[in-house]
Image: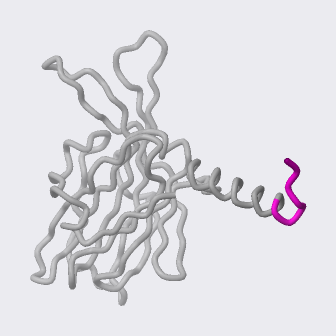
C-alpha cells in the first residue's frame, strides 16, 4: 500500500518526534530551566573505570567553586533535562533548600531507572528557597558487604541564590561521588511537590 505524500510526510514527522522523545531529545548537556532562563551545567565530577580495575578513578567533585549560579525566588519550579548519555544510566537529583521557617533542609528524588526518564520538573515546598541542586549519574558496583551500591560516576551542580543576593543559609554539601551521602529520599515524587516529565 502506498501512502499519499501528505500522510507519508506526517508519518515521518511523528516518527522523528517519537524517536527524539525516546532518546532524550536533542539535549546535549545537563540543563536546568526556570521560567525563561535555561543554564547548561558543566561536569563537577567525572569517573571512569580503568580496564582491570576494581575501583573508579574520579576527577573533580571537591567543591562548588566552578559551579554556575542562578538567582530564583522562593518556590520557583525547575525543569532538569539530561542528555541520552546520562538518561541511559540510573540518575538522581539531590537538592538543598531553606524552608519557610528558615531551616536548612536536604532531599533527593527517587532514582530514575535507565532509559526511562530524561527530564524532571522539581517544585520546592511552599515558601522554600532552593540553594543547591546536583544531578548525579549512577552506576551499580559491588558493596563491601557483598551487596550492590550505586556510586555517582558523574555529577552536575547548580548553586541557587535568592533574588536580591541575600543568602539565607549555606548550601548543604552532598558527599562527592555517592548519593548515600545525601539526605534520604522521600517515598514519592509528589511528597516533594514535583511532577514528572518524561522526555
Task: Give the residue displayed 15% in from the left and 70% down from the top.
Answer: 104
Q: Residue furthest bottom?
A: 164
Q: Is residue 21 above or below residue 175?
A: below
Outermost residue to the top: 52
Q: Is 136 within the magenta?
A: no
Find residue 80 and report its image quarter: bottom left
Q: How is the image coloured?
A: one colour
Q: Nearer the viewer, residue 157 or 93?
A: 93
- Residue in view at x 56 percent, y 49 percent: 22
The number of numbered discs placed on residues in the rendered structure image is 0
Residue sitting nearer the eye, 161 or 153: 153
Identify which residue is drawn at 53% across, 78% down.
37
Asked whether, in this view, residue 29 is left or right of residue 72, the answer is right
Which picture quadrant has residue 40? bottom right
In this rendering, the answer to whether 143 lies above or below 190 is above
In the depicted structure, whether residue 31 falls above or below residue 168: above
- Residue span colored magenta: 1-7
Place of residue 164 in the rendered image (x, y in percent of width and height, measured from the top left): 36, 90
In this rendering, position of residue 133 left or right of residue 17? left
| Residue 4 inside the magenta-drawn segment | yes
Q: Position of residue 65 (x, y in %)?
A: 40, 58
Q: Between residues 168 and 14, which one lies in front from this camera angle?
A: 14
Return the x and y of residue 187 as percentages of the image width and height: 16, 56
In screen coordinates, is 32 left or right of 169? right
In this picture, is 108 found above or below 101? above
Residue at position x 83%, y 61% in the image: 9
Q: Residue furthest front?
A: 1
Amino acid at each position: 500500500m502506498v501512502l499519499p505524500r501528505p500522510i507519508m510526510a506526517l508519518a515521518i514527522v511523528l516518527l522523528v518526534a517519537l524517536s527524539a522523545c525516546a532518546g532524550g531529545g536533542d539535549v546535549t548537556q545537563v540543563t536546568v530551566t526556570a521560567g525563561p532562563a535555561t543554564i547548561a551545567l558543566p561536569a563537577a565530577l567525572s569517573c571512569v573505570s580503568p580496564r582491570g580495575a576494581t575501583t573508579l578513578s574520579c576527577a573533580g567533585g571537591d567543591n562548588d567553586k566552578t559551579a554556575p549560579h542562578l538567582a530564583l525566588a522562593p518556590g520557583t519550579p525547575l525543569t532538569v533535562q539530561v542528555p541520552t548519555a546520562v538518561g541511559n544510566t540510573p540518575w538522581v537529583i539531590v537538592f538543598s533548600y531553606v524552608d519557610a521557617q528558615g531551616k536548612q533542609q536536604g532531599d533527593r528524588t527517587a532514582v530514575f531507572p535507565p532509559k526511562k526518564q530524561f527530564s524532571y520538573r522539581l517544585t520546592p515546598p511552599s515558601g522554600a528557597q532552593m540553594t543547591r541542586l546536583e544531578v548525579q549519574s549512577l552506576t551499580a558496583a559491588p558493596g563491601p558487604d557483598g551487596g550492590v551500591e550505586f556510586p555517582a560516576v558523574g555529577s552536575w551542580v547548580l548553586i541557587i541564590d535568592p533574588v536580591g543576593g541575600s543568602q539565607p543559609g549555606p548550601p548543604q554539601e552532598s558527599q562527592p561521588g555517592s548519593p548515600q551521602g545525601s539526605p534520604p529520599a522521600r517515598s514519592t515524587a509528589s511528597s516533594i511537590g514535583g511532577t514528572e516529565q518524561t522526555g
